[in-house]
Image (tube, rainbow, N blue to C red):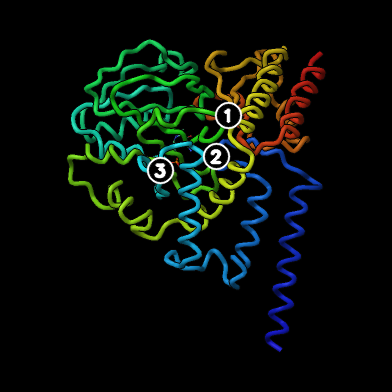
Amino acid sequence: MLTIFTYFEITLLNIDSKFRYLQRFMNNKVHNFSAGPSILPDKVFEQASSAINNFNGKGLSILEISHRSKDFMDVLDEARSLAIEISELDTNKYTCLFLQGGASMQFLMTAYNFLNKNAAYINTGSWSTKAIKEAKLFGNVTEIASSFDKNFNYIPKDFSINEDYDYLHITSNNTIFGTQFHSFPVSNCPLIVDMSSDIFSRKIDFSKFDLIYAGAQKNLGPAGATMVIINKELLDKVQRNVPSMMSYKVHIEKDSSFNTPPVFPIYCILLNLRLIKQEGIDSISEKNKIKSEFIYGEIDRNKCFSGFSEVSDRSQMNATFNINEGFDSELFNKICSNNNISGINGHRSVGGYRASIYNALPLESLNVLVDSMKEFELSQE
Ligand code: PMP
């Protein structure tokens, strides 16, 4: 009796989750422009939901299996090797970790491990500013360039890099301000990059970097895991006694399992990395270029809006824009909400709007936003 009841309950649960899944993608499709946590491919949601009920057909949920089980070790191994493969890096030189504590933990971990005397930082926004603040706890920080003078609406280009720096740290894409490095500084000191909001969104030469970190919750997976790709030679530079949880060396030696790793986020990242590999970075790059040109084209054309960041430094991931004076933002907000547009409010330090157009955002959603901007312009005549 109990078995029949449980079976019935599970069937209902499955139907309910399938129904919610269909509802998400059919009727009231919400166009999700959130900056992070943000949209992920439908397939990731579908496969992850199924693994919550039954992972690998083993009758256990991905949420309840041991992180030491063979099934999970396979997930971890595949995710790590896919990350290196997609980055086209030498597997003998680089390794990949999945850590906790978000990208914010990397602000201090990078400095704890590698800042011995003096490190250089390029300050391009709130996240760089936070990274600088943490680094100052460990040594001298030289801010070799900053765009603070114009509320971070551009990427500084005028700076020189002393090769004696322990490392140079940059933020490749500034999620809040909507600017992005379109070419990277060339230096003889190690280059560390916070790539949280544009990892695997465009074709770049990853071998320019010695350490790449990215909080998962934009182009990789759900919040809770941070991907770190590290050139193992960098470990020779560690001079401090670093506590185990903060030590890259310890995490590498323990294969990302020094403590319990974030099993579910890593599994979702794996599902996404498989899709990224399948599609290929070239195709993803091309789509992101088309998407960003489309939204910026409308921002520039539409008399009601102005872009926030300098044209040459615009981000392909986060398009920031404002309503021009004299136009009714309440009405635009209403049009967006009527059209099921979610998450386009700008960050409080910039105001206005921010459309985050990560890899998984379909052109269809962007069409809805652009049409809403046009609808708003017409209403203002
Ligand atoms: N760096 C960048 C570029 C970000 O956009 C963010 C926000 N997700 C962070 C760092 C901080 O990430 P987390 O919340 O994972 O610590």
The residue at the point 28 percent across, 37 percent down is 234
Label 2 within 8 A of ligand 1 by Cβ: yes
At 71% across and 68% down in the image, what residue appears? 13
Residue 335 can be seen in this image:
no
Say few, some or many: other residues with alpha carbon within 10 Å of mark 1 (under 14 / 14 to 19 / 20 or more). many
Residue 304 as seen in the image, left or right of residue 195: right
Closer to the N terminus: mark 2 or mark 3? 3
Q: How far across and how far down the image is residue 148, in percent?
A: 41, 17
The answer, for residue 244, to whether it is visible in the render is yes
Label 2 with label 1: CB-CB less than 8 Å = yes
Q: Quadrant of residue 32?
A: top right
Q: For this rendering, which residue is in front, 311 or 304?
A: 311
Q: Tell me, for residue 91, which label it has, or none.
A: 3
362 or 149, which lies in front? 362
Q: Which mark is residue 218?
A: 2
Residue 228, image x, y percentages:
40, 42
Q: Percent from the top left, x then y, of residue 117?
A: 18, 29
**Is 304 situated left or right of 35 in this image?**
right
Q: How far apart are the two marked residues, 2 and 3, measured between alpha carbons? A: 25 Å
Mark 2 crowdedness (10 Å alpha carbons): few <14, some 14-19, many ≥20: many
Q: Earlier in the sequence, mark 1 or mark 3?
A: 3
Query: CA gap, disc 2 to disc 1?
Result: 10 Å
State the SS at label 2. loop
At a point 48% along the width and 62% down the height, the residue shown is: 72
Tell me: is circle 1 under 8 Å from ligand 1.
Answer: no
In the displayed structure, 132 sits above or below 268; it is above
Mark 1 lies on residue:
317
Q: Amino acid under label 3?
A: Thr
Q: Secondary structure at mark 3?
A: loop
